[in-house]
Amino acid sequence: MKRTLTAIAMLCAALAATAQAQTPDPMAGAAHHVTIMDGASGAILYCHDCETPMPPASMSKLMTVEIVADEIRAGRINMNTRFRVSENAWRHGAMSDGSHMFLDLNSEVTVGDLLRGLIIVSANDAGIVLAEGIAGSEAAFVQRMNARAREMGLRSAHFVNVTGLPVEGHVISSADLARLARHLMTSNPGLYNLYSQRSFTYNNRTQENRNPLLGAAEGADGVKTGHTADSGYGLIGSAVRDGQRRIIVFNGTNSMAERRSEGLRLINAAFSEFSLRRVASANQQVGEAQVWLGSRRTVPLLAQQDIIVGGPARDQNSLTARIVYDGPIHPPITEGAVVAHLVVEGPNFTAQRFPLVAGRNIGRANWFARAWEGLLLTLSGPS
């Protein structure tokens, strides 16, 4: 039987019995697949179709960078390591119509320059050279990208190439792109600094960073643009203001100008229109669950992690929380095991679930208690 309990009284009163009519989304605009995320906590502040897989174009190059960063952290390569430009990388990168850094066939290029080309000017040839140099082939490198996505819990992600060029099945959601961007920022702060550079010069050619937020939005320091005919114009953007970081991701705008206007609108709204609320701290007890024929009748439920939710500031007082579990729970119950979830929901808010763990070990009741309970059940009959 599914049971629910009201939790965290400070979250406010329950919703009225009669559902209020949904008001039009004030954040709606030209962009699709919109995510606004708090950089410190990873809480999603706004989601418009944000968990749906979409063609990401060059925004998927963040995972290409993540695999290179893994190699650097492991000490297998460094910024001075040199990789050769193969004919494949030259033909499908430097000689293609897409973004590239004008690499010469058979030349040797440092990892540092390749990363700058990949990050600052979205160079396809740089991505292929890095993939071949690290994994032997682009296909082998892509296998590592997909494995890394699974390790990180990016459930929507499936990569087919290292460049983001359109091909069936190459997809990821905007929410997972935000999670990936946040991971790069926190785990590779030195490397992330490259995303704020406004231009890159290689082979006597200077190219500009296409990110429309740099120099236009207060505190903007990244991250990545993308564009194909299938995806439209997309952006992963981030900025820091008053010690707070916000990350935005969207796709599907119709032009560079529209991408710029949407990017500025969303990054400004990310700071002015949204707020965070701490529901519970890690290991804080938020309720109890009933136990069937256990050494105790209830088990305390603790937050597995900090539970922080965010959304439009005007809607924060309408949120509610409830504990959901399949119960009563049958012992034995192991301390630390996930046995329930806290569901936070409200009007104009995408419901979120957070794991709750058992706060202690619960064994089975002794034989007498089990026999007595069985006798009572027999006498009373099924309820």
Image (cartoon, rainbow, N blue to C red):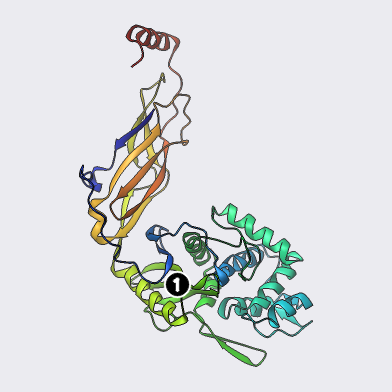
- Residue at 42 percent across and 79 percent down: it is 258
Outermost bottom residue? 204
Could you say where residue 327 lies in the image, as x and y percent from the top left? 40, 28
Whether residue 229 sits left or right of residue 376 in the image: it is: right
Q: Is residue 193 above or below residue 343?
A: below
Location of residue 95 by image quarter: bottom right
Q: Is residue 113 above or below residue 359?
A: below
Quarter of the image where the N terminus is located: top left
The residue at which mark 1 appears reads as 237
- Residue at 46 percent across and 36 percent down: it is 336
The answer to whether residue 310 shows anywhere in this view is yes
Location of residue 219 by image quarter: bottom left
The secondary element bearing badge 1 is classed as: strand
Location of residue 38 by image quarter: bottom left
Q: Which residue occupies the foreground of this view, 300 or 250?
A: 250
Q: Is residue 293 above or below residue 247?
A: above
Quarter of the image where the C terminus is located: top left
Whether residue 61 sits left or right of residue 139 in the image: it is: left
Could you say where residue 20 lies in the image, as x and y percent from the top left? 22, 51
Q: How many marks?
A: 1
**Amino acid at circle 1:** Gly
